[in-house]
Amino acid sequence: MKFTKILPYVGAVAIFVLASIIYFHPVLKGEKLNQSDITQFTGMVKEINDFRADKNTEPYWTGASFSGMPAYQVSAYYPNDLVRGIDRALRFLPRPADYTFLYFLSFFVLMMALKVNWRLAIFGSLAFGFSTYLIIIFGAGHNAKAHAIAYMPLILAGLLWVFQKRYILGFIVTGVAMALEIYTNHPQMTYYLGFALIILGIVEFIHAIKEKIIPTFIKQVAIILAAVLLGVGANAPRLMAMKEYADHSTRGKSELTITPDGKVKEATKGLDKAYITEYSYAKLETFNLFIPRFMGGGTIEKLGESSGFYQLLEAKAGKKAAKEYSEQALTYWGDQNIVEAPAYIGAVVFFLFFLGIFLVKGRLKQWLVTATIFSILMSWGRNFDVLTNLFIDYFPLYNKFRAVSSIQVIAELCVPILGILALKEFFSSKISSDEKQDALKKAVYAFGGLIVVGFLLAHGFSTFEGIRDAQYNQLPGLTDAIISDRKSMLFTDTLRSLFLMVISAGVLWMLLKGKLKQGVAIILLTLFMLFDLISVDKKYVNEDDFKSARKIDKPFIASTADKIILQDKSHYRVGNFTVNPMNDGSTSYFHQSIGGYHAAKLGRYQELFDFQIAKNNMQVLNMLNTKYFIIGNDKGDKQSQLNPDANGNVWFVENVKIVDSANEEMQALDSLNTKNVAVYQKGVSNEYQPNFPKEIDSTANIELLNYDVTTLTYQSKTAKEQFAVFSEIYYKEGWNAYVDGKLTPHVRVNYVLRGMTIPAGEHTIEFKFEPKVIQQGKMISLASYALLILITAGWFFYEKKKEKQ
């Protein structure tokens, strides 16, 4: 192959590198993006990283968060994870430029599968990668989400090659891309991609019926499924661990049929509907996709000195107050609790999408339009509950994910694809000028009309009032001023989108009339598109969001309270009530915390918090060995408080209360003296029925000798058989107990803790975290890699041999 043939592709990669680095240019100075979720994550993984560095092995468990939980969904490296090496090679740029580059590169490969000219492919890749939603998720720290989205186009490329009968290429790309997609560890995004793939499959199936090529379609589906299965199999340890943990997490089934306030509820098999749909797009809010601040932009926006909000504040409270408050103005008037920024796809890109609706023919358009509409309808969540409830109740796994608005990633992917296909057809000599002109006019009328309709609907059916406007009532006229500014933002951005549509249409019109060359038209459209998207992106993620690497890598500074507590070298837990304990990773950075920061914590632990800790049940806090509390004083400073009543790491109980259900077990904790009595649910949750000794040995002693995250060693001395409660979280899928080296059963007590019958005499008790799922998955992943390579190689040589014959 001559270098001149590959030069455009080398140039494309160079452009993608430059675009990524230029947008996130502070990385060149060694700075890092300040991401709130990643800051919390840094606290969560501190113990894991320390263990990994010290032992050169994986713990797969952390005791620093939620009193202990598996590390599978926090941070875990798995054996035979060859795909990790591929991913790291592709993401060679500093973060988050690496993910942006991956957006561009993956979409470019998809454009090649669609046989798009390299110039248009570069245009499409930049349009996809700079889509506002794909940039703003970096600001929140949703790196795994960005990672998963980045590999979506690559999977589509593989499928399209299979449907184009380029079977070997399609098989290997689909297999590797699926392996990379699963590796990103964001099941929700992968799940949503599945909807797009199903819709594509349905469209192809209908085509196969019409063309009477069902056997070919079945063969293609078989190839795709084989590649997908091998890609999934390559991640077997990760997926098997995830599935095992999911059943015990907040995504799994709950045995409780009561609520914390005593009301009756149905036992759930997934997340609560209200929680799933908490972040739902309003129907009108959909106009944000092509009018950036249709609903005021993000929850907080900066308003300039010309705004009515600023001017009123300046007149009533002075310039300083006006500047301070206008930089954090509550301009968003939708009903979502928090919105980082609008999910703006772009006026230029959306105009091209409409052009594609009228110009592109065939099943690709049918797929892209259908998938886009589907994703928008599903993103409405509670605002279109007939459809949403149908999927929550009957569609497998849909009730495992929250923030349904994020299903718009399908639209984020499909809209630019159809837009580029529209340009491909517009530049084609196979379509007449009259047909192009007619499509261009229809696109202008349809898209322009939709923009105007959105503007009129907002003014006709909305009050422009926000859910937090009450805090502006203290100053007369301030609420009216912010509403006026919201209307002004809508008007300005509506004109902006109309203008961008008109100049984009004008470029294509001039090309059609021979007044512009194709290359110039592509350059102009690219510049308009980049201006459109980047000018919006920069409002929400820019150089101001970067900090020195030292501050990002070590985001937490020990307070005086932390330092006092750290002087205690024993094993204990800390309850930090200066923050929401169940939404805090900072405490885990320094201590073993009863709280943490994770969307999929253990379900029973969340229930324990809701029913007991949230009600300040000291007996429950004591059984979790909460030796220290961090509280705020009158000045707002943190101070430590010793809890002398903490039960310690392990203790013998005098009695065990046996109950029949999870409800009874939870309710028993309301008044349980956890130092003397344990509560045990028989039958359902514990396969092993323990002995509960009747005689109490007042001289018995048991203590923790060593805590090493995955190995806990205790020493017991008792004249009679006793029952011990260990202040460690029960998780039967991996924790094994040994008495003097002999495997010995243990059970769950007190809803979340471990209990065990201790024989008379002096004994060494060890708890070791030995998850079988890792070893089982290890062999499956090896076999999947081998099959993916061998099948591809064998198929290739077989085809070559056929060609020679």
Image (cartoon, grey):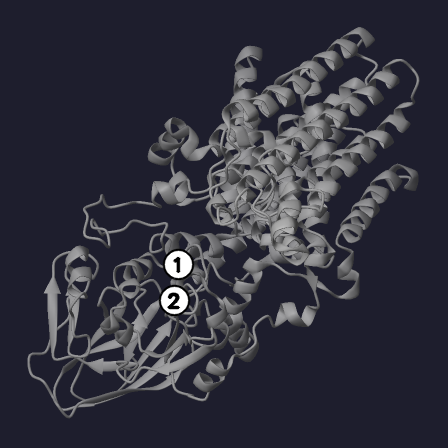
Circle 2 residues within 10 Å: few <14, some 14–19, many ≥20? many
Residue assigned mark 1:
601
Residue 388, position as x, y percentages in the image: 40, 32
The disc placed on residue 750 is none
At horizontal 42% and vertical 42% (from top left) the residue drawn is 278
Q: Which kind of residue does numbered mark 1 sit on?
A: Lys
Callout 2: SS: loop
Q: Which kind of residue does numbered mark 2 sit on?
A: Phe
Quarter of the image where the N terminus is located: top right
Callout 1: SS: loop
- Nearer to us in this view, 682 or 232: 682
Hey, which quadrant is residue 804 in on the image?
top right
The vertical placement of 422 against 176, above or below, is above
Count of labels in the image:
2
| Residue 528 appears anywhere in the view | yes
Q: CA distance from mark 1 to mark 2?
A: 8 Å
Q: Is residue 167 left or right of residue 63?
A: right
Query: Marks 2 and 1: in contact by CB < 8 Å?
Result: yes
The vertical placement of 642 against 338, above or below, is below
- State which tag comes first along the sequence, 1 or 2: 2
Q: Find the residue positioned furthest to the left.
A: 694
The disc placed on residue 66 is 2
Residue 596, position as x, y percentages in the image: 43, 65
Hey, which quadrant is residue 25 in on the image?
bottom right
- Nearer to us in this view, 195 or 568: 568
At horizontal 24% and vertical 55% (from top left) the residue drawn is 260
Residue 413, position as x, y percentages in the image: 63, 34
At horizontal 70% and vertical 16% (from top left) the residue drawn is 443
At horizontal 43% and vertical 58% (from top left) the residue drawn is 776
Q: Find the residue positioned furthest to the front.
A: 316
| Residue 90 appears anywhere in the view | no
Q: Find the residue positioned furthest to the top.
A: 434
